[in-house]
Image (cartoon, rainbow, N blue to C red):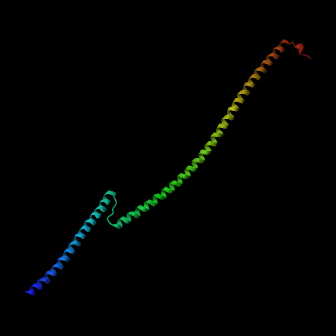
Amino acid sequence: MRETNGLLQEELEGLQTKLGCQEKMQGTLVGLELENERLLAKLQSWERLDQTMGLSVRTPEDLSRCVVELQQRELALKNKNSATTSNAWGLEKARQQLQEELQQVSSQLLEERKKCETHEALAWSIQKRVLLLTKKGDGIRAILGSYDSELTPSEYLP
């Protein structure tokens, strides 16, 4: 009986060891199942990202590819922005030069208009003077003509 008892004791210890291993494996299995659920949730979030963002990202390599593409687009947009900014600066400089030229031409036009007004006033004054002198000359001719008609032909002889 002692032998049977010893054998049963050994078998019990072996079974307890196996039970401990099984419990440990069960704990590990539970941990792995939790890790599996966490990874599945992560995978689903990646799949939702694909649906919400329109990106075909299923793996980290896909994500890396998308990041590289985005960086390339960003670089292209930065280059385009730089070119546009440079072009805008050039256009602004040209606009300022044209504005300065416009101011110069406007001031020249104003001066020319003043000169034109002065010349027109002077021409009007001269025309008035010529008209007065013409009338005066006509008046003097009329007076001389009346004197001539009053004089007899013998009075003309010197």
Which quarter of the figure is the N terminus placed in? bottom left
Image label count: 0
Instruction: Using residue 17 as the reference point, say whether residue 60 is left or right of it.
Output: right
Q: Position of residue 98 (x, y in %)?
A: 59, 46
Picture layout, residue 11 above or below residue 119: below
Give the residue displayed 24% in from the left and 70% down from the top: 31
Q: Position of residue 106 (x, y in %)?
A: 63, 40
Instruction: Using residue 146 as the reference point, say whether residue 125 is left or right of it.
Output: left
Q: Position of residue 7 (x, y in %)?
A: 12, 85
Query: Which residue is farthest front?
Result: 2
Query: Which residue is farthest right?
Result: 158
Which of the 4 image quadrants contains residue 8? bottom left
Query: Which residue is farthest bottom?
Result: 3
Q: Nearer the viewer, residue 32 or 110?
A: 32
Q: Nearer the viewer, residue 28 or 123?
A: 28
Query: Which residue is farthest left?
Result: 1
Q: Nearer the viewer, residue 85 or 6?
A: 6
